[in-house]
Image (cartoon, rainbow, N blue to C red):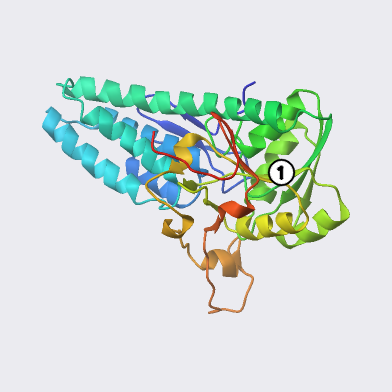
Amino acid sequence: MQSTFSPITFNKTEIKLLNQTLLPRIEEYEVYSDYLDMTDAIKKLKVRGAPLIGIAAAYGISAALNTHSASSLIELLEFYKKLRFAFYQTRPTAKNLFYALDRLDKVVENPNISSVDQLRESIEAEAIQIHKEDELSCLKIAENAANTLFNKKDNYTFLTHCNTGSLATGGIGTALGIIKYLHNQGKNIHVYVDETRPLLQGARLTAWELHKERIPYTLITDNMAAQIMKNHHIDAVVVGADRITKNGDSANKIGTFQLAIVASYFNVPFYIVAPKTTFDTSLITGDEIEIEIRDDLEVTRFNGIESAPIRSKSENYAFDVTPNNLISGIVTEDGVYFSPYKFCDK
């Protein structure tokens, strides 16, 4: 099973991105060749989703190296350091970004690389491989969930948060990928979609993907989740993750933590769905995760229009951390993990 569209394509010197800030009204692809424009696109959420951020950074660095007029390997290596630093600073919470950068570092550190062309070709091959691996990972995640968790009946109702589909990954998606896979198997699926304030990734992006796939869904505001679980049978809440620590604590889009609390109250299974590239076993618990804080204008304005009194103070945490005791299972390409979560370095 493949995605019906790709939010990112790469051709050596250019990256073509679907501008996610314009969805669902406008489906527009933009072409990037300058690395500063690419880092800006990541910061402004034109490209987003933990796995896709890593892919975009790898492609951005490769394109920049391919167009740089370095006369020596030393000069190109110095430019790589500058590129790495620029992408490193874009989004602090998503582990996949740093995973991709670490992969490229290993290429750069290879003592067998002895020329400018060899470095460019090796970085490009690694960036493409990171993308391919994530595509395969998404499919394996969906297969594991279908075989282990959702194989008892033909009808399933899910509740989601944020966007975890093709717009966030290199393939069919993580949590949303499971839903697409089950639908493709012929199961009757219905999805309650949290709109996901303040930037409405659920309303703008997840609903857009479900519409494209012709999967039935109902859009709800974030604060309707408890009432929906009370009034309707929900088989599971499935969400993604941006970083998972050694004990299973999981950082995801703001609002996930409270959704997990509500799911626990109503005894609804709550699953984190993510590739192993999202795991950060250097951190013991979620308290150690750096949480990105974004511009408060995202809260006080909508589409450039003031939605609160001018000069209102606000806080804009982009993520929160769900403690492991509220997580029913963590679905990865290696299988489904259940409590107690004790992830080790591999």
Badge 1 crowding class, 10 Å Cα cut-off, few under 14, some 14 to 19, many 20 or more, is many
- Indicate the position of residue 341 as horizontal and vertical percent values: 53, 44
Q: Residue at x 62, y 75 (%)?
A: 308
Q: Name the image quarter holding residue 105.
A: top left
| Amino acid beneath label 1 | Ala
Element class at badge 1 = helix
- Indicate the position of residue 103 as horizontal and vertical percent values: 33, 32
Q: Which residue is labeled 1 in the image? A: 207
Q: Is residue 84 left or right of residue 152?
A: left
The reply to whether residue 24 is visible in this rendering is no
Question: Which of 208/129 is in front?
Answer: 129
- Indicate the position of residue 83 as horizontal and vertical percent values: 27, 42
Q: Is residue 109 left or right of residue 47?
A: left
Q: Residue at x 28, y 22 (%)?
A: 122
Q: Is residue 345 left or right of residue 241?
A: left
Question: Which of 41/100 is in front?
Answer: 100
In the rendered view, would you say 63 is above or below 231? above
Question: Which of 198/226 is in front?
Answer: 226
User: If the image is split into quadrants, where does the C terminus sit?
Assistant: top left
In the rendered view, would you say 270 is above or below 121? below
In the rendered view, would you say 198 is above or below 3? below
